[in-house]
Amino acid sequence: MFEKILIANRGEIALRVIRACKEMGISTVAIHSTADSDAMHVRLADESVCVGPPAAAQSYLNIPSIIAACEITGAEAIHPGYGFLSENAKFADIVSEHGLTFIGPRPEHIRMMGDKITAKQTVKALGIPTVPGSDGEVSDADAARMAKEIGYPVLIKATAGGGGRGMKVAQNAGELSFALSQARTEAKAAFGNDTVYMEKYLQRPRHIEIQVLADAHGKVVHLGERDCSLQRRHQKVWEEAGSPALNAQERDEIGGICTRALEKLGYLGAGTIEFLYEDGRFYFIEMNTRLQVEHPVSEAITGIDIVREQIRIAWGAPMGFSQKDIVFEGHAIECRINAENPFTFRPSPGTITQFHTPGGLGVRFDSAIYSGYKIPPYYDSLAGKLIVHAKNRNECLLRLRRALDELVVGGIETTIPLFQKLVREPDIINGDYSIHWLEKYLASLGY
């Protein structure tokens, strides 16, 4: 097994990887910017290297500095976490060129799934269902013709998109030209690429994703589904495993489709295939070739440490279990506790004056914050993730309600009050919500 791994990330995910490494007897190297010199992941790693000033482009995205940190410390492998360089195929290539191991998928698969059009064409050929729409870039004339064929409303999406940027909805023919123009402008500004494509806009879909693991020996398994339908501006807020909308037969069916497809692809490592789900049908939207923020809910219902498996797979070890060994037990929910106003989502960096985490059976809080820690304004606002697990969804909701009432993060604004309201909403209790529910709910509150 690896003797030393460098974690090319920060915050709770860096700490998550450090914990997995320590339990495997692997030494860890943390990298950090000057703004993160007192961060918890720096304190708990065996070694740390400063890779640049606060701006991410000069530190956590600074590939030469990260490679140099490996050479200085003797790290053999790099775990990229999520975000930053985790889906950067060029970075994965450079890591390999320097005789190091990238703990993640092969660069060609990162590239393939990083372009939305290529990804859609690839999975369609592999038998994964896709949303009706264009198989490639659309001109205004093509878009008008296709929209008439598949029916309005339609969704214009950037091919290099992510995080909801470069996405616009046209409800009718009169809105199409403006939506195309807006999407291209936004995509150019965000990604340097104004290419867009078009899909049928589903009215009340849920966001369902399948967690997969694949080793170098041809074995691919799925760890069930996660329901990530509670979103704001296409950003996930609350995730569940399993979905209140699916039954075991549907889970097995879509899980089987995904594993068979990735077997054909020769995929390696952890990945998540994301779908929109409406009226009993699945429609592929994208594949994330990395660890997901919401991976703990899958770990809760399966008992499988996904980060540990990532590391073992990168080393070349076979998975010690097959699909028939995976048993789905109970229900799990994750709430993303952000350093933001709970209703406007305005960032709220600052010093944490009070901090108390909830405890008890089935409660987990993944975070790198502590009392006295100053959350810097330069990075993602995620302060922690509250994960609860129970025998069934009803007990899970009651446990979540209790845990949220125990959780204290003082000195800054957080999204805790939002979740305290959501966990008491009848639609949430009944599992009756779509990807549009949260924005409509916030609008009803005047936000």
Image: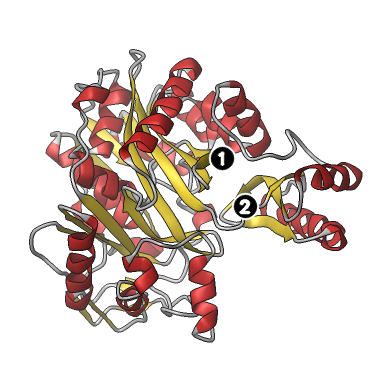
Q: Is residue 46 visible?
A: no
Precedes in sequence: disc 2 or disc 1 = 2
Q: Position of residue 443 (x, y in %)?
A: 55, 80
Quadrant of the snapshot with the C terminus:
bottom right
Secondary element type, mark 2: loop
Q: Horizontal and vertical percent for residue 356? A: 16, 74
* Residue sticking out furthest to the bottom: 446
Image point (43%, 80%), residue name: 341
Provide residue 169's location: percent of width, then percent of height.
71, 59
Please tell me which residue is depicted at 40% across the width and 22% down the height of the picture.
99
Q: Is residue 155 above or below residue 131?
A: below
Does residue 68 appear anywhere in the picture?
yes
Return the mark for residue 283: 1
Q: For the residue labelled by badge 1, is the local secondary structure a helix, a strand or a loop?
A: strand
278 horizontally vs 213: left or right: right
Spatial CA span between label 2 and label 1: 10 Å
Residue 202, numbered circle: 2
| Horizontal arrangement in the rendering, residue 64 relative to residue 355 (left or right) | right
User: Which of the two residues, 60 or 323, is positioned nearer the viewer here?
Assistant: 323
| Residue at screen point 56% across, 55% down | 163
Q: Amino acid at mark 2?
A: Leu
Residue in the picture at 52% in, 82% down: 444
Q: In the figure, 230 relative to 158: above or below?
A: below
Quadrant of res 371: bottom left
Left or right of residue 239, residue 93 in this image: right
